[in-house]
Image: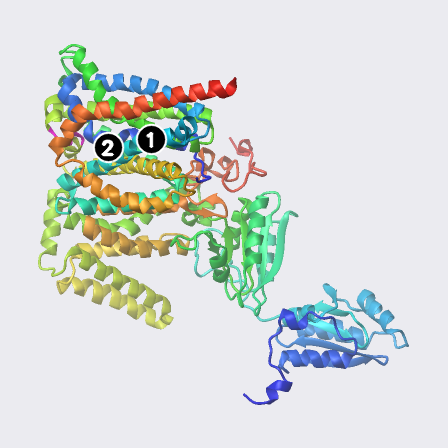
């Protein structure tokens, strides 16, 4: 494939964007619905789980020694079984990418440009994604470095301008419903985005220094989780758990509440920009992972010829994936965890066992 | 045309026909030269004899300094040579060693070298029955002289600019950098024009592989003529299909000298005052040489201002379109009411309105460049009064739109480098179209696409967006914020890893 490499810092930025992207949109509502005012605790809980998960994924990354997930699977399980194995993984990435695309499309059509048909919104977004994937992982990683400072500035600005609206009473009573809802609702953040990080195994081999990359992955997970924590807590503090649970896009809603000196209002656009940026990076990582994975699956030398056909399929898949937002919310609440658990945890675990056995056999 | 052409071929001197050695009999040689040059009237041949050995001096009138030829060549050869019988070989050696009081004297043996030297202003001395010939450097032609820069004006700092003559330009650089490591390597590019091109760099500072790459790209060029450094730029630039410039140019010797000290390589082309500088990074186009002459605080402020202007020039019209067409709810209510009141009676949608005004401005701008100076003021009257005020009064555009276009226009003139404003001018229209179709969504996606494109560019192996992407913490001292000179402790690490230390920070007072 490409001879491109990215630095550990760039990888960390990609991980941060990957975690924030799309989950910042869809996570606070179900979190507040299940965890109520203690939802912020469940985010912390899931970050802890995320760190353990990343250690496990790091282990796979170093065991497969410079191979991507697809290459490692074919290497371990052979041509046929390995490819069958990869079909599950790649279809997971592809479906996930379509859902992420639909997330931004849904948001745009309901909140920002209601008159533009969904397919055009999706097509325009995917055109940029395809262009970026065509340029390669180096350009993607570098642009993450350009946008990261902007995202940090916007987040800080958002937090500071939200300060007057904060009401600490919204968090009380702490642990009023006991510990169980906290633990239960932590599964939401675990399902999306943490378990989706298995997709990053397709990017991990491109990072220059493996040791630094592992640290970057863990650090990125903590920082990304921290931003999710910040946003969820802000939602709870400003809107309260009930309003957060009722709103489809509570983070957008809190943006509408900003009012500086009676003139600077309507700053929800800042939130929209943060979302677009983060979702863009999440989608481009998934798209890159999918196209490179399929190219390796088909032993093609270059992933670029796949980009356009994959994109055409994705526009269609993203529109037929689910009929409406209510359906999607049930899907995320009930089905997604087991689906992502299968592909984000069990598939990598099988691969790891295979890698360990392979290593043992070839070592002796 | 007529049949005389057969005997008198009007061919241009090129490698194939001239790479054979000189003909020893003088008259044969001269007639060959005359044939090749087609009896051009500016070719001067002076035949004379040094005690029965026939010689000839050749030069091109207008390219040479006639005083030098008169005083140091003709006089020396015709009056001061000993009048006694010597062999041709001996005579040649006497002339070469002792008789010609000329600084630069070269020996050559074939016609290719002869024509190259003759046509670049050297004086050729041919001796009958001698296989070697001599060329004396007598170049001297009218040029503009070192004048004040017209396209890059500064308030503080040197005002001088490069000229059209290569030698003057290298001298201007030598005067600024008196280090023996300053290398000037010349080559001729262009089959017909044979334009002299000099590659200039500091040997201990510039990376060898960048210098090598510059030479490789220059050697690869096959073209009939180079008339300006823009020809070279298009051959050696990395991104052929990008609106963004990946080669920096300047006509100010201090800007180029500053680049050389940072480890860049300058390419001077004969015949143009614009000197190329590579590698060129995105941030270079926002930095003026004046930034280093003024105090650090105001330089920092100006650099940030330029970046703000970059964004205004690029986004202002498209944001206006997006907000007034799609996102009225995001405009604060009093402003929205005022905007709506202005737009009442304007027959066009915001996009058409903006497109009309932006196009008008581009037309005015281009006309302003081309028009003769006395007419220029007429254009500004037409532009400001007739098009601006009257368009509003006639109800064709809203006053807010005029403000937007004016601000955009002024912002695009802020940059010290003219060529970074060119992609802004072109991309602005793309952004406007996307804003008119997709609103803010389209603008942000276009922005992301632009950043992706910028991040994929490289200039001579150096990532175009460095030191932002990849982030180089050490280099941030001289990008947005300019540290005081004692704080600019190292050369930009994305450009060179050699001889990094520039200053001793503790050498400052206090």
Can you tell which mark lies on residue B275? Answer: none
| Residue A250 part of the magenta segment | yes
Magenta range: A247-251
Viewer-closest of B397 and A175: A175
Q: Is residue B258 above or below residue B48?
A: above
SS assignment for the magenta stretch, majority: loop
> Image quadrant for the N terminus of chain B?
bottom right
Q: Residue A274, how many percent across, how many down?
A: 25, 35
Q: Residue furthest top?
A: A178
Query: For numbered disc 1, what is the local secondary structure?
Result: helix
**In the rendered structure, the residue with mark 2 lies on which chain?**
A
At label 1, counting other C-alpha atoms closer than 10 Å, the crowd grade (few under 14, some 14-19, many 20 or more) is: some
Occupied quadrant, residue B53: bottom right
Q: Residue B487, how many percent across, how many down?
A: 49, 35
Residue beneath label 2, please?
A22
Residue beneath label 1, please?
A84
Q: Residue at x 26, y 65 (%)?
A: B383
At label 2, counting other C-alpha atoms closer than 10 Å, the crowd grade (few under 14, some 14-19, many 20 or more) is: many
Occupied quadrant, residue B47: bottom right
**Left or right, residue A245 beside residue B53:** left
**Left or right, residue A244 beside residue B234:** left
Q: Residue at x 11, y 61 (%)?
A: B347
Spatial CA distance of label 2 from label 1 is 29 Å
Q: Is residue A235 visible?
A: no
Viewer-closest of B178 and A250: A250
Viewer-closest of B79 and A200: A200
Q: Residue furthest right?
A: B85
Q: Earlier in the sequence, mark 2 or mark 1?
A: 2
Q: Residue furthest front?
A: A80
Q: Residue at x 63, y 84 (%)?
A: B8
Q: Residue furthest bottom?
A: B3
Occupied quadrant, residue B385: bottom left
């Amino acid at each position: 494939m490409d001879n491109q490499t990215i630095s550990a810092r760039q990888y960390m930025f990609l991980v941060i964007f990957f975690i924030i992207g799309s989950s910042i949109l869809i996570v606070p509502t179900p979190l507040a619905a299940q965890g109520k005012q203690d939802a912020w605790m469940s985010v912390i809980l899931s970050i802890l789980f995320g760190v353990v998960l990343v250690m496990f994924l790091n282990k796979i990354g170093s065991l497969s020694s410079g191979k991507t997930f697809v290459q490692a699977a074919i290497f371990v399980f052979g041509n046929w079984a390995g490819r069958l194995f990869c079909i599950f993984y790649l279809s997971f990435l592809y479906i996930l990418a379509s859902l992420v695309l639909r997330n931004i499309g849904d948001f745009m059509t309901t909140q920002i440009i209601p008159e533009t048909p969904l397919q055009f919104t999706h097509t325009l977004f995917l055109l940029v994604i395809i262009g970026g994937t065509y340029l390669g992982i180096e350009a993607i990683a570098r642009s993450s470095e350009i946008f990261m400072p902007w995202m940090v500035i916007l987040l800080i600005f958002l937090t500071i301008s939200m300060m007057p609206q904060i009401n600490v009473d919204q968090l009380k009573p702490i642990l009023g419903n006991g510990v169980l809802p906290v633990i239960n609702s932590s599964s939401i953040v675990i399902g999306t985005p943490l378990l989706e990080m298995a997709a990053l195994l397709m990017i991990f081999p491109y990072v220059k220094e493996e040791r630094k990359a592992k640290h970057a992955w863990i650090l990125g997970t903590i920082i990304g989780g921290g931003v999710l924590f910040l946003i969820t807590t802000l939602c709870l503090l400003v809107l309260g758990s009930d309003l957060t649970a009722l709103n489809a896009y509570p983070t957008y809603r809190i943006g509408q509440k900003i009012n500086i000196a009676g003139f600077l209002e309507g700053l929800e656009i800042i939130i929209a920009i943060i979302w677009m940026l983060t979702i863009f990076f999440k989608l481009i990582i998934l798209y890159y992972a999918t196209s490179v994975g399929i190219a390796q699956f088909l032993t093609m030398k270059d992933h670029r010829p796949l980009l356009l056909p994959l994109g055409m399929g994705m526009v269609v898949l993203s529109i037929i994936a689910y009929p409406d937002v209510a359906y999607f919310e049930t899907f995320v609440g009930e089905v997604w965890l087991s689906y992502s658990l299968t592909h984000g945890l069990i598939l990598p675990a099988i691969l790891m066992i295979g890698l360990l056995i392979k290593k043992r056999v070839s070592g002796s | 045309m007529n049949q005389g052409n057969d005997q008198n071929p009007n061919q241009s001197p090129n490698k194939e026909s001239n790479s054979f050695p000189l003909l020893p009999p003088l008259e044969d040689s001269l007639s060959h030269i005359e044939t090749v040059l087609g009896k051009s009237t500016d070719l001067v041949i002076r035949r004379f004899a040094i005690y029965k050995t026939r010689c000839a001096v050749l030069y091109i009138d207008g390219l040479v300094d006639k005083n030098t030829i008169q005083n140091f060549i003709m006089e020396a050869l015709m009056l001061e040579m000993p009048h006694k019988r010597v062999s041709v070989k001996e005579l040649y050696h006497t002339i070469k060693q002792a008789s010609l009081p000329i600084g630069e004297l070269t020996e050559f043996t074939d016609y290719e070298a002869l024509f190259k030297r003759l046509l670049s202003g050297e004086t050729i001395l041919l001796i009958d029955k001698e296989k070697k010939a001599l060329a004396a450097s007598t170049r001297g032609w009218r040029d503009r002289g070192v004048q004040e820069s017209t396209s890059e004006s500064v308030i503080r700092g040197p005002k001088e600019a490069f000229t059209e003559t290569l030698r003057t330009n290298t001298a201007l650089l030598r005067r600024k950098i008196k280090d023996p490591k300053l290398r000037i390597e010349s080559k001729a590019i262009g089959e017909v024009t044979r334009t002299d091109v000099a590659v200039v760099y500091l040997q201990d500072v510039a990376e060898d592989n960048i210098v090598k790459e510059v030479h490789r790209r220059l050697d690869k060029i096959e073209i009939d003529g180079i008339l300006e450094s823009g020809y070279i730029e298009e051959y050696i630039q990395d991104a052929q299909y990008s609106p963004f410039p990946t080669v920096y140019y300047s006509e100010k010797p201090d800007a180029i000298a500053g680049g050389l000290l940072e480890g860049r390589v300058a390419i001077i082309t004969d015949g143009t005052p614009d000197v190329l500088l590579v590698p060129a990074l995105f941030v270079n186009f926002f930095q003026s040489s004046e930034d280093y002459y003024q105090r650090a605080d105001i330089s920092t402020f100006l650099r940030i201002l330029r970046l703000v202007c970059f964004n205004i020039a690029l986004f202002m019209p498209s944001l206006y379109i997006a907000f007034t067409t799609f996102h009225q709810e995001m405009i604060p209510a009093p402003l929205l009411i005022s905007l709506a009141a202005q737009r009442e009676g304007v027959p066009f949608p915001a996009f058409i309105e903006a497109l009309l005004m932006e196009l008008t401005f581009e037309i005015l701008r281009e006309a302003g460049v081309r028009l003769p100076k006395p007419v220029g003021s007429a254009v500004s009257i037409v532009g400001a009064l007739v098009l601006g005020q009257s368009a509003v009064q006639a109800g064709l555009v809203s006053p807010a739109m005029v403000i937007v276009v004016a601000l955009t226009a002024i912002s695009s003139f802020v940059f010290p480098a003219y060529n970074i404003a060119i992609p802004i001018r072109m991309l602005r229209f793309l952004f406007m179209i996307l804003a008119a179709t997709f609103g803010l969504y389209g603008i942000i996606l276009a922005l992301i696409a632009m950043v992706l494109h910028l991040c994929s560019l490289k200039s001579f192996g150096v990532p175009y967006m460095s030191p932002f992407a990849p982030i180089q913490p050490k280099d941030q001292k001289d990008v947005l914020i300019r540290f005081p000179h004692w704080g600019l402790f190292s050369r930009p690490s994305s450009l060179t890893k050699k001889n990094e230390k520039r200053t001793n920070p503790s050498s400052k007072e206090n």
